[in-house]
Amino acid sequence: MSKKSLVITSIGPDTMEVLHTFAKASKERNFDFIMIGDTKSPAEFKIDGCDFWSVDRQLTVDSKFAKLCPVKHYARKNIGYIIALQNGTEEIVETDDDNFPREEFWNEKSRTVKAYDIKGQGWVNVYNYFSDNDKFIWPRGLPLEELQKVSKPLTDYEMKEVLCPIQQGLADENPDVDAVYRLAYPLPLNFNKGMNLALGDGAWSPFNSQNTYWYKEAFPLLYLPAYCSFRMTDIWRSYVAQRIAWANGWSILFHEATVWQERNVHNLMKDFEDEIPGYLNNYKICSELAALNIKGGKENMLDDLLTCYDMLTSKGFVGKEEDVLVRAWTEDISKLW
């Protein structure tokens, strides 16, 4: 059996029911449950089956990145990935502290999955395929310019075995949509079951950090940027991961919801403000990524990651301060991966 880790970041204590649910299930299934705190987290936080890391404890990690990462940012989740690697994990599943797992969340997974093989289609609204025709919905991070694009019928695509070291599960009840959607359309919404889509070379879709499974060969691509909007960090990570995945012959799997979200309190207009960099730049970023010379192969992956972030910082999509952080990350990962 491969060693598996669950990584969540939380400041608690309002999410204790979710955290206890994950801790109990992780202990029963022999998952390492690593929870990363921040400055607002309680000084003492103990749940049986959960390995909690306060900010002070995070600073004891043998990691250059952990000592440089800013506080009060979701990017501290990167420290949880580093701890998991130091513990010898081979598979990482991540979610957030407002998602409740269904039994299927814990099912044994495989890198190779039978799925609709989608390539060369440009932007793909994955949520369209998991919802009924009368439900207009799109994932957070899909460029607004692409909302009216008509999705091809699934019958246009071949069903085949596809290599997917990164796998995105959807979330029911309160799915991961942007502030524009939340301000304009009603929720809750549940997605349809029993389908796999694999997006490969030339097919873009954002994926998030709310229900995502990573195999060891893709671990360098876990990196969440710190010097960008909180609402964009996992989305822009997903673009970088997709571009490098293409060069390695991988696809990104999208599958049915295995969590349901009881969303933490949000100010939708604040979310909208924080998503403006995405509304303005999502399309541009992926055009720039597509034009990069990405080499592919394990021996080049860390350099390929730096190539992507050099573009993001040089073009002003991500702050220049990211340079030091992403290089600290690659230095740490090179010793562990």
Image (cartoon, rainbow, N blue to C red):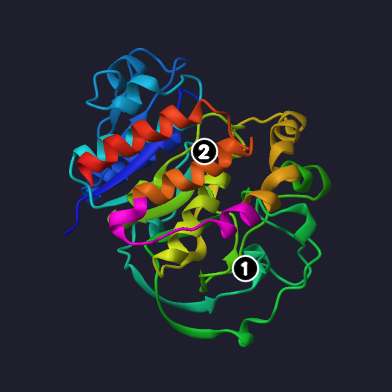
Front-most of 11 and 153? 153
Amino acid of disc 2: Asp
Q: CA distance from mark 1 to mark 2?
A: 22 Å
Corner quadrant of residue 129: bottom right
Left or right of 22 on screen, residue 2:
left
**171 to 9, vertically: above or below:** below
Q: Which segment is the magenta one?
A: 286-301
Residue 316 percent across, percent down from the top left: 64, 35
Q: Residue at x 47, y 15 (%)?
A: 40
Q: Which mark is residue 130?
A: 1
Q: Which residue is mark 2?
A: 98
Residue 288 percent across, percent down from the top left: 62, 53
Residue 289 lies in the magenta-colored region: yes
Amino acid of disc 1: Phe
In the structure shown, which secondary structural element does the residue marked by tag 1 occupy?
A: loop
Front-most of 169 and 288? 288
Residue 260 percent across, percent down from the top left: 53, 50
Residue 218 percent across, percent down from the top left: 35, 55
Q: Residue at x 70, y 37 (%)?
A: 277
Q: Main secondary structure of the magenta part?
A: helix
Tell me whether the residue at label 1 lies in contact with that at label 2, contact meaning CB atoms closer than 8 angstroms.
no
Mark 1 or mark 2: whose residue is earlier in sequence: 2
